[in-house]
Image (cartoon, helix red, strand yellow):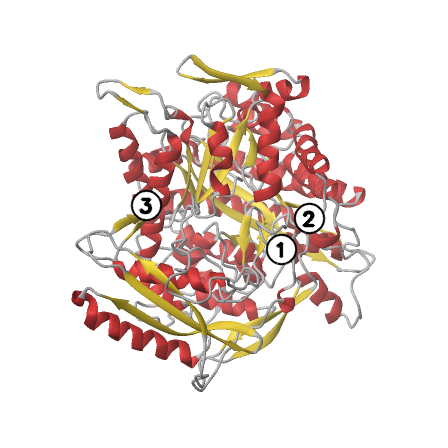
Amino acid sequence: MSAFAAPIAEQIWDMKYRLKDASGTPLETSVEDSWRRVARALASVERDPARWEERFFDALRDFRFLPAGRILAGAGTGRSVTLFNCFVMGTIPDSLEGIFQALKEAALTMQQGGGIGYDFSTIRPKGAEVRGVSADASGPLSFMDVWDAMCRTIMSAGSRRGAMMATMRCDHPDIEEFIAAKQDAARLRMFNLSVLVTDAFMAAVEADAPWELVFGGRVWRTLPARALWHRIMRATYDYAEPGVIFIDRINAMNNLAYAETIAATNPCGEQPLPPYGACLLGSVNLARLVRDPYGPGAGIEAGELAELVRTAVRMMDNTVDASRFPLPEQAAEAQAKRRIGLGVTGLADALTMCGLVYGSPEAVAQTENWMRAVARAAYLASAALAAEKGAFPLHDEAAFLSSGFMAGMDADVREAVARDGIRNALLTSVAPTGTISLYAGNVSSGIEPVFAASYTRKVLQPDGSRTEEEVVDFAVAEWRRQGKEGLPPAYADAQGLPPEAHVAMQAAAQRWVDSSISKTINVPAEISFESFEGVYRAAFEAGCKGCTTYRPNEVTGSVLAVASEAPEPVSLAEPLDRPAALDGATYKLKWPGSEHAIYITINDVIHGGRRRPFEVFINSKNMEHYAWTVALTRMISAVFRRGGEVSFVVEELKAVFDPRGGAWMGGRYVPSILAAIGGVIEQHMVAIGFIAGEGLGLKADPEATGRNGMAAPAGRVCPMCGTPGMRMIEGCMTCPACGHSSCG
């Protein structure tokens, strides 16, 4: 009998976590083989590896403990990869040499697959004097564009999708430009943006007081604090960014306040980290721990939860020693503090199976109880590890025990830490778990509510056709397994929850999380601006360390829709016939250094009620390009006429690098002329609603085409599997079908 609760779970395992050789041939026959590989790798640093391998394997069994994807995919493979999920890079020096050294470090980290965060507040504002060169500074936003181009280049060279977080203090002179940066749809697409909001700023907003923008000890400008706050809120209301990080609260509650100052987070915000800080992640699957689901004794047994947490802490602590790191500074930081991020997933499903409605007062109370139990067990386990293996090197007993978070910890935990020390400086976090939650049988993600009871997924078959498969929420599947119809009495999903329920759940979890939480507060499109702004005020007053919202609208896209309602991708076995006349558009592409422009004509056909590309013509007066443009025209057109999900053509073209160098176009680096053509084709596919993406931002040339208007995009389509219906989960655009996340 398969260990997988649903077909999608096995497909996720095969695609992301199953060990395969260089040719793609599987080296593991079952998920148990994968669990064994991970357990053996993490036990290898123990004095008695065999004993701990069995304990670790038992924790992984039945998907009860879910190490993050990097550990599942990388541990025990012998590959030169990091098992850490996220990094905050070193402080960026305010010098050209220092900035580009920081860029190099970021590229090396992203090459190994790490998501990164940066605070750009350290770079002097736009217009500041650059001494010695008689010039004015271009400001931090200009360098963020360079980082964005680097991330695109790393990604197009074959790396996993890049993920970056940029933060800026609310008193930096360029904060208004930072707030508005992503209102340009073509700018900073590799970044999530968050404003570092201080307690002083929130007090100034409340008092409607003036607010000074400062850098280098100089006041550059003064403006009303409330006006700046409203600008942040309006950008988030309309564009879903920037997020808000309550940075003073993060530093005040940090166990390591005596040893570090935090100014940035990882891409999804659940890990506030110091310079060169790194964190690995893992989740206890609460949904798998519920005993007697829907029965009179439904609940989680405290002893089983505590024992699982103890084992998970040991596994994650061992990972610190088993992992490689992109930079020596990151290895040194990890070893000095041994920070881990143990969280939970399946919370909403566990509540449902226990008869508690997500967001209700009873569910809020139970969430706090479970999170407290996890924190207690984690800290006690870490203290026991310290007695056995030693405390983390920077442990200072008095300073640690007087820190903000530890001050609220239970007395017996404080006594254990005072007696034995503690192995890990920080232990708990709630990270995005979209993919591993699918892998575990489509349990609800992190502490998020259930998205939908079920949805229809399109599955690509070897012959290019697609079949339909129902993906059912774990708690709903259990309800059905018991022979019951309809939905469980306590079922609630994201579409029907008021914002205050989200805030209450996040705040309840945050009380027992020493790092932070990745969570999206979904709000209805029709929410008033005043009510929307009130969500952030409520999050601040409730003790949250940050706030991320998502309001579907014409700009952000209406992603809160069940995938089965989205247009069905077309997949054809035989080539389409060419109609006598086709509608299309022609784009003019001017490659730097080339005397003549290239004209790219893309014609479309309507099939199954959906516009799709049918043929491409590439023309130029430059005879140097003649042979390959003709070949490219014929090849791409042949692929398009076969039908199916042909968007892979774009990705293949965009990945082509010219050894002679690329060019800057529209504020971004394009690695070759073929990549530029791929960008044009992508732009057209986006415009007709065939895929989601960006392209080069070119418009159809009105002198070269009879049609300049195009159909509006039909919705967000996953760039990995082509399935419509991507949605915002835990601050990341996430595909419900394959688990692909915009955060990497």
- Which quarter of the picture shows residue 132? top left
Say whether marks 2 and 3 touch (CB < 8 Å). Answer: no
Q: Quadrant of the N terminus?
A: bottom right
In-front residue for pair 239/368: 239
Left or right: 179 as drawn, with respect to 533: left
Q: Which residue is found at the position 61% from the left and 56% from the top?
A: 559
Residue 108 shows up from this direction: yes
Give the residue at mark 3: 150
The residue type indicated by label 1 comes to Ser
Left or right: 569 as drawn, with respect to 672: right
- With respect to residue 689, does 41 lie above or below? above
Marks 2 and 3, Cα distance to the nearest angstrom? 34 Å
Mark 3, other Cα within 10 Å: few <14 / some 14–19 / many ≥20: many
Instruction: Indicate which disc residue 525 carries.
Output: 2
- With respect to residue 423, does 86 lie above or below? below
For the image, the number of numbered tags is 3
Mark 1, other Cα within 10 Å: few <14 / some 14–19 / many ≥20: some
Marks 2 and 1, Cα distance to the nearest angstrom? 9 Å
Residue 668 position, x and y percent, is 34, 47
Judged from the image, the secondary structure of the residue bearing numbered disc 1 is loop
Q: Which residue is found at the position 49% from the left and 38% from the top?
A: 193
The residue type indicated by label 2 comes to Ala
Instruction: Indicate which disc residue 558 carries.
Output: 1
Residue 269 position, x and y percent, is 52, 39
Tag 1 or tag 2, which sits nearer the N-term?
Answer: 2
In-front residue for pair 33/381: 33
Q: Which residue is found at the position 35% from the left and 79% from the top?
A: 638
Say whether marks 2 and 1 touch (CB < 8 Å). Answer: yes
